[in-house]
Amino acid sequence: MSYLELLKLASPETIVVITALAVLAIGLVTGRAKSTATVSTAKPTQSANETSTATGICSAVAVLGLAIAIGTVLMLPRNATLFGGMLVITPLTSLFKIICMALAFFTILLTKSEKSLRHPGEYLALVLFATVGLMLLVGSEELLMIFIGLELLGLSLYVMTAFDKTDVRSAEAGLKYFLFGSTSSAFTLFGISLIYGMSGTTSLAAISDKLTGVSIQALLAVGIVMTLIGFAFKIAAAPFHLWAPDAYQGAPVPSAAFIASASKVGSFVVLGKIVLVGFSSLHGSAAWHAMVAGWSPVLAALAALSILVGNLVALAQSNVRRLLAYSAVAHAGYTLIGLIAGDRDGFSAALFYATIYAITLVGAFGVVAMVRRETGGDDFSNFAGLASRSPLLAGCMSVFMLSLGGIPPLAGFFGKFYLFSVALRAGANHGLLWLVAVALLGSFISLYYYLMVLKAIFVDEPALAAARDVSVVPPALLPRATVAVLAAAVLLLGITPEILAARILAAVP
């Protein structure tokens, strides 16, 4: 294969990388001009305006590059495989490259609501490099390339988490995320090395062929468990979730939105391909009446623990971002149910649920960003009286919270219904009924804390001191429009879920 053909097949990733470098260069040039102007004029208002202008220019270039890359994905061939699975083009990989870039697109649109973002070029370049890592993740079926994509994604997210130099919590969150992420990378790489030692290959298809008919030996079991533990860190499944609350609360809000949405979607796509393609012959069984050793019981234990821990600890939270972090732990458990079901329908249900959850979370963090910009915080008290201050944001937040709680006719309801029905049909004699029962219990518990957020928005009155401090300047138009579009998407996917669900089901092999 010629380099020109390779460049054509990897053109979406190439375009995003070029866009990231262009945004970085623009940020450097505008940053120098801003520094010179600030020294000569020493006017804070002018400096703030120049920062806003630089953010606007960099954001425009970034979203334009992502739009071009999305169009390029649509022009790729339907199926292609390069270098033994290093780069794979299928309807599934193309669809989720588009989804990851769309989530990055909306994340970039929300950066206008982050007033502490002093170096927009560098920040948006990191978002784009993280997006490239996600595209490599979902577009590969080779363990080494998957690991490279994970590291590119992880290194970008660590810096994005610690990007706010004005907030000590951001540095703390970045350090904790880095330490936990490094540990998860070590688990993943050591697990991959053991799997390679037992199978002699790192290609998922070849691993599946090598392990067919092979009994689970001790080293192979350790390798599979360590790989699953590494990905459990990435998706914030209990008990490997301890980095998530601090990272969600301390990071700049667009960073938290990207971590909670796009990185989760990419991780679930890869985890699904690893267990359902590479380890397909070692599925085992998590059925309550017929447990069989394999990766399925391990994921079932992680799912049940995540649902219980995430929902119960979320009850005690008074900060909306920490509440969303523990909610993310529970939703990771729900999504794992689809993978445990193990068939094509289960994988499709898991990917559909992860996607609608990601869309919902980007919108919810968008509302949090604007409330934080307006009031200076993101506790329940900061959301008090939001319905009277901004009916649009209050309505959008209601859509997001009720969707996360699984209330019809929103997308979250159909996502949970799809997951739970697939799990009940999996296996014989409703073997996963116990896991569905745990998930239903967790869903009932979650309604309480989601409704607590809505109580603060619609019922609670803001304290007099807090009411005096609230700015009368409305949030920027672009972030408000972005949040409204995401809320409309959640409602639309709840009313007509086949728009996305049918495409995912058709794309899953």
Image (cartoon, grey):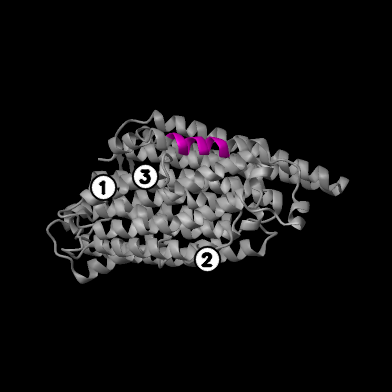
Q: CA distance from mark 1 to mark 2?
A: 32 Å
- The quadrant of the rendering that contains the C terminus is top left
Disc 1 residue type? Val
Q: Nearer the viewer, residue 410 or 460?
A: 460
- Quadrant assignment, res 111: top right
Q: Provide the residue span drawn in magenta.
A: 483-492
In percent of width and height, residue 415 lies at 36, 44
| Lower position in the chain sequence, tag 2 or tag 3 | 2
- Quadrant assignment, res 407: top left
In percent of width and height, residue 108 lies at 58, 42
Task: Tell me: residue 316, above or below residue 34.
Answer: below
Task: Tell me: residue 402, above or below residue 498.
Answer: below
Disc 3 residue type? Gly
Looking at the image, which residue is at 33% across and 48% down?
A: 350
Q: Nearer the viewer, mark 2 or mark 3?
A: 2
Q: CA distance from mark 2 to mark 3?
A: 26 Å
Identify the mark at residue 415; answer none if there is no mark: 3
Identify the mark at residue 316; answer none if there is no mark: 2
Mark 2 burial class by Cα count in 10 Å: few <14, some 14-19, many 20+: few
Disc 2 residue type? Ala
In percent of width and height, residue 409 lies at 42, 39
The residue wearing badge 1 is 422
- Provide the secondary structure element on which disc 2 rests: loop
